Amino acid sequence: MRHPKELGWVGFVLHHLLPSAWREELLGDLIEELNGYIIPSRGAVRAKLWLYQQGASAIIAGLWHLLHRGGVMAKRRWLLSLLIGLLGVLQSLDSGVHHSSGWVLGLVALAVFLPVVGLLLDVGQPLWLGVASAVLLTAARAISPIPLPELHISLVFLVGFPMVYYVMYQQNTAGGARGAV
Amino acid sequence: MSKDGLPGAFEQFVLLAVLRLGEGAYGMTVRRELEEKTQKAVSLGAVYSTLERLEQKGYVRSFAGEGTEARGGRAKRFFAVEGAGLSALKEALEATDRLREGLAVLAPTGVTS
């Protein structure tokens, strides 16, 4: 089912981040309670605050669920995302990005953040996330006031590791051993 | 004692809410019942993750209802307490009662001893 338009951008975020095990039911409950009880009793503004609060706590509960209930593959995915995040940060620091401007630092942080979060939330699409990271790193190198020749080495971790993981994951899924949620 | 140990405090609250609601127990009603009776803010995410944990322990079972227009066509997921859940809940409440026994400081409001 598509993301619920009744909940605005919160619905879009929840639709993509909640565990599939209870995504549809929770979204249905939110729509029903928001329109049937919260808006009539609290008004539109406070209802929006209620929705943001419910959305944020649902995402936290969902992440907790993925970590603890996702099986062996999910735990490997969390460990791997921590590892690539760490290696990405270390390689970026090693290439001297911290001596560059704030904009460059922001672009590099986003380039590391995207594949890490993509893997953490099991978004899939490692190639496209990798392309996005490569574009961000290239932009960072282009605008950097100091040369950052070794910056792209971090793509080995940011793109390579998730792609290897998903190849292994698909093999497991094909063998009927899907452990992730 | 049940093999998964005694249910935690929030698990006990959720089991009690599901019992109180009977056939009308689904995410939203459980959340509202908890909020009304505990007078504390309760999130739907916490309710769902707890219900799923209880289902994995065999304390509750769930079944799908029909989608309605008020829910954007999304189905409800109803919950019911299983025998194992009832036993675990009784065990936990009895343990609480035994621990509470004789403690004047925790006597229910309006009762003096």
Image: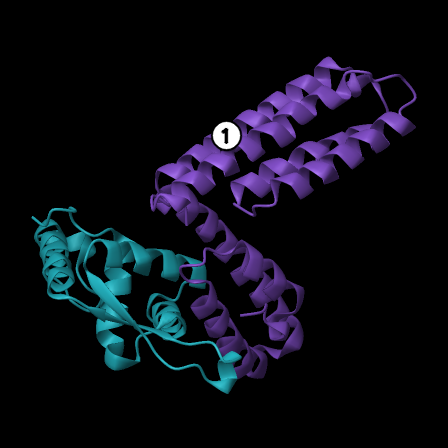
Chain colours: A purple, B cyan
Q: Which subunit holds the residue at mark 1? A: A
Q: Looking at the image, which residue is at 14% across and 58% down?
A: B93
Image: A152 above or below B91: above
Give the camera-side residue of A178 and A10: A178
Q: Which residue is most to the bottom?
A: B69
Secondary structure of the residue carrying numbered label 1: helix
User: Label 1: which residue?
Assistant: A80
Q: Is residue A46 left or right of residue A97?
A: left
Q: Is residue B30 visible?
A: yes
Can residue B43 be seen from the camera position used here? no
Characterize the local packing of mark 1: few (<14), some (14-19) or many (20 or more) Cα atoms within 10 angstroms: some
The image quadrant that residue B34 belongs to is bottom left
In this rendering, the answer to whether B86 lies above or below A102 is: below
Of the residues shown, which amino acid type is indicated by label 1? Leu
- Report the side of A39 relative to B33 (left or right): right
Identified at 56% across, 34% down, the residue is A162
Q: Quadrant of residue A86?
A: top right
**Count of numbered labels shown in the rendering:** 1
Relative vertical location of residue A19 with respect to residue A88 in this rendering, above or below: below
